[in-house]
């Protein structure tokens, strides 16, 4: 047998030997999602201070910086199967169509670790001048699904035909924020919510718990906004 023939035979045997391995690997099917451990913890009196900017329809931020403060009013409640529900007062006045000094929103977490906020999709639609859907609990972070997955965050219509989806973007990111006056490092996750006319990004952490940055991208004719956390005050247990 020539050298060329022996080499050809060896390659053929090697390829045949790979077939059972390939079949065994294929039999395993898709990998199960790996949940991301995440646990929100709020206490009444916790506060968060943000720098805020408007973003014009061309994507340029306003040269004028304003400030917003969020303060936890209540925490540890339950609603619609969610636990640790917190009610947060929000002094944000940019993109607001109300004359009230403060507004409030609720946030909670399901048993599998996903984070929900009541009425967020409706608030986004209002700020972008879209038809405002009914307010409901929107799943804003699918930690139970892990990276590489998407989920339905909520709907832009009452018939639930126009969905807003969520997804993780990249891995954890770090932010420098003052905690009770001491400069500290937060590890946060970036999450994108997107749908027809909607592009909303936020970074969230659980140690300490809070939203580190929020960006509502502008529409073709409407303004967006950015909020960057600069300081948080944690209530004394």
Image: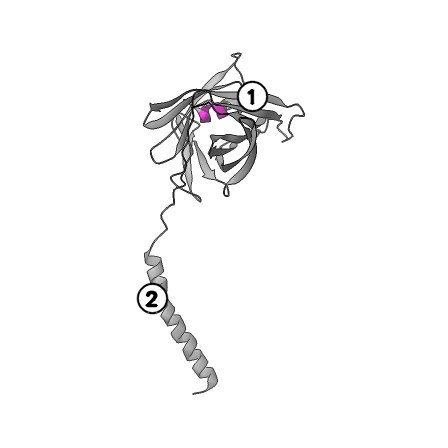
Q: Position of residue 48 (x, y in %)?
A: 52, 24
As drawn, the label of residue 20 is: 2
Question: Is residue 117 highlighted in magenta?
Answer: no
Residue 93 spot, x, y in % from top left: 56, 18
Relative to 134, is 200 on the left or the right? Answer: right
Q: Secondary structure at mark 2?
A: helix
Q: 183 and 204: which one is in front?
A: 183
Judged from this view, the residue extending furthest toward the bottom is 1
Which part of the image, by quadrant, shows the N terminus? bottom left
* Above or below 1: residue 195: above
* Residue 168 vs residue 55, the one in the foreground: 168
Q: Residue at x 41, y 32 (%)?
A: 115
Other residues around mark 1 within 10 Å, as few (<14) / some (14–19) / many (≥20): some
Look at the magenta stretch and give its main secondary structure: helix
Q: Nearer the viewer, mark 1 or mark 2?
A: 1
Q: Tell me the magenta residue range.
A: 120-124
Point out residue 70 in the picture as x, y percentages from the top left corner.
50, 21
Mark sitting earlier along the chain (1/2): 2
On screen, residue 37 versus residue 213, left or right, reads: left
Tell me the element at label 1. Answer: strand
* Position of residue 129 in the picture relative to residue 57 (left or right): left
Observer able to see residue 223 = no
Q: Where is the C terminus found, in terms of image quarters? A: top left
Q: State which quadrant residue 59 falls in.
A: top right
Can residue 152 be seen in this snapshot? Answer: yes
Q: Nearer the viewer, residue 58 or 175?
A: 175
Q: What label sits on residue 202 in the rendered view?
A: none
Residue 210 to residue 17: above or below: above
118 relative position to 230: left or right: left
The label on residue 68 is 1
Q: CA distance from mark 1 to mark 2?
A: 61 Å
The color scheme shown is: one colour
């Amino acid at each position: 047998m020539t050298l060329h023939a022996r080499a050809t035979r060896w390659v053929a045997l090697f390829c045949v030997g790979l077939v059972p391995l390939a079949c065994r690997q294929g039999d395993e099917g898709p990998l199960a999602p790996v949940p991301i451990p995440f646990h929100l913890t709020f206490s009444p009196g916790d506060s968060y201070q943000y720098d805020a900017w408007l973003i014009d329809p061309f994507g340029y931020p306003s040269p004028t910086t304003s400030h917003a403060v969020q303060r936890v009013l209540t925490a540890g409640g339950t609603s619609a199967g969610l636990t640790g529900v917190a009610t947060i007062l929000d002094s944000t006045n940019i993109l607001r169509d109300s004359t009230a000094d403060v507004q409030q929103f609720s946030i909670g977490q399901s048993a599998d670790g996903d984070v929900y906020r009541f009425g967020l999709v409706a608030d986004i639609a209002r700020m972008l001048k879209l038809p405002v859907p009914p307010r409901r609990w929107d799943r804003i972070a699918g930690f139970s699904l892990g990276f590489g997955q998407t989920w339905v965050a909520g709907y832009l219509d009452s018939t639930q035909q126009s969905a807003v989806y969520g997804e993780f973007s990249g891995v954890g990111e770090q932010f420098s924020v003052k905690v009770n006056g001491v400069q500290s490092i937060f590890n946060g996750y970036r999450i994108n919510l997107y749908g027809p006319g909607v592009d909303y990004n936020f970074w969230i952490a659980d140690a300490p718990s809070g939203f580190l940055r929020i960006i509502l991208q502008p529409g073709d004719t409407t303004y967006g906004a950015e909020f960057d956390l600069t300081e948080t005050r944690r209530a004394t247990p």
